[in-house]
Amino acid sequence: MTDAPTIVPQDTTESTDATQVKPMRVLAVANQKGGVGKTTTAINLGTALAAIGERVLIIDLDPQGNASTGLGIDRRDRNRSTYDVLVGEAALRDAIVTTSVPRLHIAPSTLDLAGLELEVSSARDRAVRLRNAIGRLNDGHAEGTDYTYVLVDCPPSLNLLTVNAMAASDAVLVPLQCEFFALEGLSQLLKTVEQVKEALNPRLSIHGIVLTMFDARNNLSSQVVADVREFMGSKVYDTVIPRNVRISEAPSYGKPVLVYDLKCAGSDAYLRLATEVIQRERELATH
Ligand SMILES: Nc1ncnc2c1ncn2[C@@H]1O[C@H](COP(=O)(O)OP(=O)(O)OP(=O)(O)O)[C@@H](O)[C@H]1O
Ligand SMILES: [Mg+2]
């Protein structure tokens, strides 16, 4: 990363005050493997960050629309979607809807998004449309009411949608399922991050890797954690998300697990992950 100018010396003894003006951080939640916990992480990390006081926007960039459904946004209420934003027919602000969680908003998706790649294939700005939309997000908006975190939920593919997410982000957060072959495909993902960094977004970095669906009764799970930590070192968050039935039940009620069952192990893990994400942000800011 290039040196960012220091704006104000930080008093580290003070607690975080989310009402002060903070820069917006954009994180892409990406892994081309399907079903590894991207959407679950976007929803629940987003909810945990909002619970801590951050103002969070989730951008649903998957035509499946699982993040939108999981947050209880009915398909009939998706009047404007991320598809409209990426084809240039709506501003991102106009697509945003509130959720039942205070300070957590979402720009929902619809199935139309599946056709985007073909529709914009000859447009020169096709890979930076999301970045441009996010860049205009705070136009004319009161200072101090803008988002502090934007989480982009990517589809299970390294397609134009994921490239848009990476081109628009400060960093990539990679959920990795604790299963055999967990690391398979990771090098391809890291290569894509490098390519986007070189061609479109020099500031892009890997924020971290979060191990998901850890099963303590399964020796394989522990072996996967050890292997991934050996291969990726400090890039792996300390927090491991357990396999937890409450996490898998919550979306069918249109609720994040933290709302569905705050006391369960899954909620606890996502709260710890949020604390770690914020901690990493602080470390990045002081480097
Ligand atoms: N920690 C967990 N414990 C139990 N079930 C989980 C956990 N995390 C995710 N799941 C379940 O696993 C399935 C896949 O999770 P999720 O939809 O988050 O993955 P994804 O990577 O977004 O999938 P896709 O690639 O299809 O977008 C879902 O049914 C989800 O409820
Ligand atoms: Mg998903």
Image: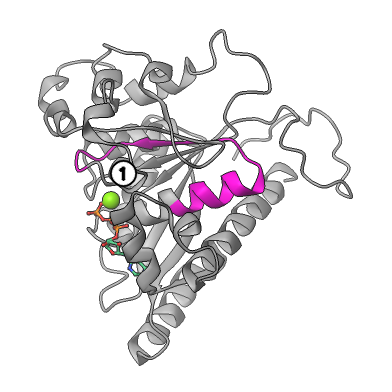
Image quadrant where one finds the N terminus = top right
**115 sits to left or right of 30:** left
Q: Which residue is mark 1?
A: 154
Whole-percent x and y of residue 128?
34, 23
Ligand 2 has an atom within 8 Å of the beta carbon of the residue at disc 1 = yes
| Residue 52: in magenta span | yes
Colouring style: one colour
Query: Please, what secondary structure does the residue beneath circle 1 have?
Result: loop
- Residues drawn in magenta: 44-64
| Residue 55: in magenta span | yes
Whole-percent x and y of residue 208?
50, 57
Whole-percent x and y of residue 240?
49, 71
**118 sits to left or right of 62:** left
Ligand 1 quadrant in view: bottom left
Query: Residue at position x 26%, y 68% from top?
Result: 184
Query: Residue at position x 64%, y 53% from top?
Result: 280
